[in-house]
Amino acid sequence: METSEKELSPQESLQLIQTMINKTKDSVADDSFYFLLWGWLVFFCCIAEFILKVYLQYPQHYFVWCLMPVGGVISGIYGSRQSKKKRVKSFVDEALDYLWIALAMAFIVLIFINVLGQTSWQSVLTYYILLYGIGTFVSGKLLRFRPLIIGGLINFVLAAVSVKFSYDYQLLIGSLAILISYIIPGHLLRIRHQQQKN
C-alpha cells in the first residue's frame, strides 16, 4: 500500500524545523507578557524590600513578596486565555512550558525549604538568581534569541558573585539579574514582535 505522504529531504526537514522555531519565537514574542510581568514584579519586590529593610528598617520588610501569588493568578488567567487562541503547540512551545513549570516548582520548593526548615534566608537569592539564569539561558537557546542567552549567562556569574554579599545587597544583585535576564529581553522580544507585525 502506497503512502500519500512525501518524504522530506534533509534540507526540507531543516526548513520545517526552522519554520517551527520562528513560529514559536513569534508566539513567545507576543507572550513577552510573562517575562515583563515577572520581571517587573520581582524587580519591584527586590528594590522595595531593600528600601524597607535597609533605609526604613521596617521589621516586616519581607511582606512585599506577598505579591508573588498575585503574579501567579494573573499569569494563570492570561495563560488560560492564550491557550484558547492557540490551536497547535510545537515541540519548542511544549519544551518551554515544561521548563518554566519545573522552575516554578523549584522556586516554591526553595520557599518551603527556607520557611519549614527554618534555615537562613542568606543564600536564597543566590539560588533564585541561578534559577533565573537556567530559565532564560535554556529559553534563549530554544528560541535562538541572543538577549535571553546572554542574560542567562550573566545570571550565572551574578549567582556566583552574590554569595560574597549580605542578604541586603543580594536584593540589589537580584534586581540587576532580573533586569538583565527578564526585563530587557522581554522588551526586546516585544519590540521585535511589533516590527514583524508591521
Image (tube, rainbow, N blue to C red):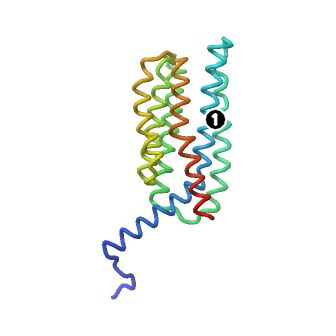
Query: Along the line of sight, which residue is nearer the eye, 55 or 12?
Result: 55
x then y, percent, for residue 14: 36, 68
Query: What residue does disc 1 label?
Result: 41
Number of numbered discs visible in the structure rendering: 1
x then y, percent, for residue 65: 63, 27
x then y, percent, for residue 100: 50, 44
Query: Along the line of sight, which residue is nearer the eye, 87 or 11?
Result: 11
Under mark 1, the amino acid is Leu
> Is residue 165 depicted above or below 72 in this figure?
above
Q: Which residue is located at x 60 percent, y 56 percent? A: 30
- The N terminus lies in quadrant: bottom left
Q: Which residue is located at x 53 percent, y 32 percent? A: 108
> Is residue 62 depicted above or below 29 in this figure?
above
Q: Circle 1 — which element?
A: helix
Q: Is residue 84 left or right of residue 159?
A: right
- The C terminus lies in quadrant: bottom right
> Is residue 58 depicted above or below 11 in this figure?
above
